[in-house]
């Protein structure tokens, strides 16, 4: 445990600058709004606003407490290696201490807090709050679907692959964003009975894709001798495009579900009356 805590505090400062690239966030937010059902059709008029402001949370990272809302290093916790993850933040704090839990990232709880606040904003029929919270929720849900937002080795700094975070989520996605098409809504839309469990489920799933990305980075480097060339990015995309397609569409799907659930939990207020 002591060794892991030392590693955590050595690498923590680098986590403050990392997040999904703009294009990834824009795609996820846009697809999520587009996939909403007919009964939320009026919500779609706010699509451009939500897309544009889906990166606002990144612009607030200098604000105290914001940066740790964008990730959770679930492989720091010993439960991870026995095939489980503690969902209850108070339980984690009791075992590991508040400073450790905070430093390891609070993404799932930040996501649920934003969701709960969105439910309340719908109840209040407060358009400004709805738009701000819907945009922030888009950001946090997107981050939870980026595999490298779920591990200690988030930038390859522990495996000799430093910079992989930006290479994958920003440089590669910007090059191939036009190939990432909207696969449409796959889940049924209902009120989510346990939002925290819902969020942890997709975070754990995202974590399972990390080995594919790290392996692809090594593969592309091995055959091109570079981590900057267009040939490198071509091979990186070749080896990760299915994961990337999966993660971006899974994120937009989860976001659609959360939007619908928040609105339904608020009693399905008439969206035309939100002002």
Image (cartoon, rainbow, N blue to C red):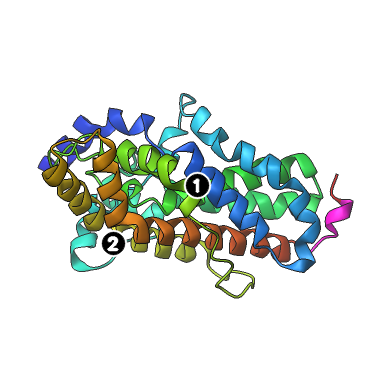
Q: Nearer the viewer, mark 2 or mark 1?
A: 2
* Left/right of residue 231 with respect to residue 257 in the rendered view: left
In terms of depth relative to the viewer, which is nearer, 77 or 138?
138
Q: Is residue 272 magenta?
A: yes
Direction from residue 257 to residue 105 in the image, left or right: left
Residue at the outermost right position = 273
As helix, strand or loop, the secondary structure at mark 2 comes to loop
Q: Is residue 113 visible?
A: no
Coordinates of residue 167 in the picture (x, y in percent):
31, 38
Q: Specify the quadrant that holds the C terminus.
A: top right
**Which numbered circle lies on residue 173?**
none
**Residue appearing at x 70%, y 65% in the figure:** 265
Q: In the image, residue 239 lies at what x, y percent?
A: 27, 56
* Depth check, front residue: 141 or 166: 166
The disc placed on residue 140 is 1
Q: Please, what secondary structure does the residue beneath circle 1 have?
A: helix
Q: Residues within 10 Å of mark 1 (few under 14, many from 20)?
A: many
Q: Earlier in the sequence, mark 2 or mark 1?
A: 1
List the single residue furthest toward the front.
Answer: 231
Residue 48 in picture, x, y percent from top left: 69, 42
**Position above or below: 246 against 89:** below
| Pick the front one: 212 or 61 | 212
Q: Please give the residue where the numbered disc 2 appears in the rendered image.
A: 208
User: x, y percentage for residue 81?
Assistant: 18, 62
Q: Magenta stretch: give its range.
A: 268-273
Q: Residue at x 11, y 45 (%)?
A: 222
On the question of residue 54 being in view, the answer is yes
Name the residue at 25% across, 49% down. 235
52 lies left or right of 112: right
Q: Residue furthest bottom?
A: 188
């Amino acid at each position: 445990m002591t060794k892991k805590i030392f590693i955590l505090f050595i690498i923590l400062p680098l986590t403050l600058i990392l997040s999904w690239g703009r294009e990834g966030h824009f795609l996820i937010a846009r697809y999520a709004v587009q996939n909403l059902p007919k009964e939320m059709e009026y919500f779609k008029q706010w699509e451009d606003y939500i897309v544009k402001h889906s990166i606002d949370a990144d612009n607030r990272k200098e604000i105290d407490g914001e940066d740790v809302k964008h990730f959770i290093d679930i492989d720091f916790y010993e439960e991870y290696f026995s095939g489980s993850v503690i969902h209850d933040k108070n339980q984690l704090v009791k075992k590991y201490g508040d400073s450790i839990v905070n430093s390891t990232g609070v993404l799932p709880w930040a996501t649920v807090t934003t969701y709960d606040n969105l439910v309340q904003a719908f109840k209040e029929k407060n358009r400004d709050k709805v738009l701000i919270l819907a945009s922030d929720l888009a950001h946090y849900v997107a981050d939870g679907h980026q595999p490298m937002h779920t591990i200690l080795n988030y930038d390859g700094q522990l495996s000799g692959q430093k910079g992989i975070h930006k290479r994958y989520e920003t440089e590669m996605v910007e090059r191939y964003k036009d190939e990432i098409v909207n696969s449409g809504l796959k889940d049924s839309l209902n009120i989510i009975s346990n939002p925290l469990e819902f969020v942890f489920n997709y975070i754990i799933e995202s974590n399972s894709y990390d080995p594919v990305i790290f392996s692809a980075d090594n593969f592309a480097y091995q055959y091109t001798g570079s981590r900057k060339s267009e040939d490198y990015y071509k091979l990186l995309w070749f080896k990760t495009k299915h994961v990337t397609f999966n993660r971006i569409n899974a994120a937009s799907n989860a976001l659609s579900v959360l939007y619908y659930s928040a609105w339904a939990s608020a009693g399905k207020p008439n969206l035309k009356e939100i002002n």
